[in-house]
Amino acid sequence: MSDAHPMWLRPGPIPGLAGGAVLITGDDPLLDTVRAEARAAGMHLVGPDQPAALVRISIDRASGGAPGTETGFVLTGDGERTVVVAGGASGALCGWFEIVRRAATGRLHEPGTTRHEPAQAVRILDHWDNIDVHPVMGQVERGYAGGSIFFDAGRVRDDLSRVAAYARLLASIGIDRVAINNVNVHAREARLLTDDLADVARIAAEFRPWGIRLHLSVSFASPIVLGGLETSDPLEPAVRAWWREAADRVWAAIPDFGGFVVKADSEGQPGPFADGRDHADGANLLAEAVAPHGGLVHWRAFVYNHTQDWRDRTTDRARAAFDHFTPLDGRFADNVIVQVKHGPMDFQVREPVSPVLAAMPHTRVALELQVTQEYTGQQRHAVYLAPMWREVLDFAPFGAAGPTIADLAAAGGGIAAVSNVGDDGFWTGHPLAQANLYAFGRLAWDATLDPAAILDEWIALTFGSGASGSDGEIAAVVHELLDDSWSTYESYTAPLGVGFMVTPGTHYGPSVDGYEYSPWGTYHFADRDGIGVDRTVATGTGYAGQYPEPWASTYESLDTVPDELLLFFHHVPYSHRLHSGSTVIQHIYDTRFAGVERVDAMVDMWQRLDGRIDGDLFARVRDRLTEQQRSAREWRDHVNTYFLRKSGIADERGRAIHP
């Protein structure tokens, strides 16, 4: 398990730091981690009575110059030395990794003083790992990088060295919590809460030196499945007692345990609806159990009818989370975090920001993102997602003068994301998909960071960052390849806010009508006259009215709805003219062809690096880009042919479409 290629923390001495002295003052296990990192970087540890150190790291909770949080730090450079004053040991660790970033990007000892504190108090990664290999979803549900780094052969791995390496990587980007198992909790995984606690504690021990707390996904039916009770009714005293005892056992085994993640009454998972209770009743049951230990309950808002009749156009999956949860605002306990997907559907390449994120002011609400690329190429396509996430974080639900989604998350429950790693030698299957994990951590720490600058940080740490020569050329190629890859993927897949034109089950590759007549409630409603879902208040499902102003009116009107979301909110003729000047049908044709041309260019770009980087890495990316090229052409031909046949309108440029 320890033979993985490094991600952005390459082993060995760090240029700019190696050979220099470092003074680290204080006594804490996390400071011991910092000292070990400094030694591994090639630095010499010195005491306060020895010569001036290149880097000084200390904790000062009382000083007015120190940050106000344990994880924060103040960094001062004078051109020759760098000083970090942290608010706590975790801040010292984060300060160390900021020094590593600065060394990689040529900014070590940069003059000036800067304050660094995480904008989001909770920064959690959710793993969708199963202990056993599930017959449909495999060991990691929606995982595209091999098996689990935590589990193997039906139990927790004996060798957890890969977990330790992973914890170090997460600490370097400020992640402080990890849920290690699937939110779809199968019978075997449910026993992590009981029979497997000693082994779960071994995983927690690998996270602890890096300041990371372990969480578990739990089944709401655990009192039945594990406790032999006849009910999971959250108002039943015996059920409440069972959960209190379960929480006591977990914290006895893992004193710094973080809490529970719950998917309930969703896609077949059990929940409080079975006993006539609501989500606040269910979440507060668990909140009561974990509260004495300072624990959290992450209760997912991904709840909708997945067995609806496709003939019924009044049922709109996009409305579901809002309709279920906003009436409960103010009823959730203070240690409950309602975890809301960034869009109302399911991690599509383009969808509007979920209105639920702004509609529950009296509830702790967390933003949920998906780092694993379920609907964005499954780590067979190179798609850098930070630009999409930054758009979500910058969205201001109440208008430009109001708070952004990043502000609302910071005031409530923070940010969560589904992780994208596995036991593949390159961690993420596609080596370039490592950039997404890195970017998630950096944006969770500071949502104002520029995605392009984050990308350059990752490239510098991963490949080196020489201003000239091979390193500089490698950096330029990787940056150009990834920088607008999200828009490239969108351009050959889903047009103008349409989603789910994918192969059912696998969610990979084009199937324009794949979900059109399914019970999952995801449609494009294309016919001979037009395309799109009418979600207006005036004539449609009313979803647009779930937004506050100015967005309710913006999305309601064809005159103001953004082009990229047109078909999410409106059913329009193929001849409808976009703000860009193109018709809908011509936009579909043009973007499909342009997307494939862009992927062709990406393939050519990468080929220029043959013989100039690690051969295994080059080959893996080359093979993934070749598959992306094949898939992009398939997408282009499927989508263009489908809409040519539907509309009967030819491409005005006369390009080859297969009628």
Image (spheres, rainbow, N blue to C red):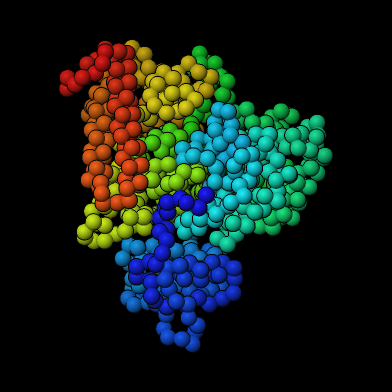
Residue at x 55% of width, y 42% of height: 148
Image coords of residue 27 (percent x, y)? 59, 74
Q: In the rendered view, does 13 fall on the left or right side of 237? A: left
Which of the 4 image quadrants contains residue 641? top left
Q: Dividing the picture into quarters, in which one does residue 229 lie?
A: top right
Q: Is residue 360 above or below residue 324?
A: below
The x and y percentages for residue 655 are 19, 21
Q: Is residue 131 left or right of residue 474?
A: right
Q: Is residue 202 above or below residue 192?
A: below
- In the image, 440 versus 465, the foreground residue is 465
List the single residue furthest toward the left: 653
Give me the residue at 29% from left, 27% from top.
633
Q: In x, y percent, where is residue 546?
A: 50, 33
Instruction: Give the quarter of the figure containing the C terminus.
Output: top left
Residue 128 drawn above or below residue 472: above
Which of these two is toward me, 67 or 43?
A: 43
What is the residue that sits farthest to the right in this orientation? 238
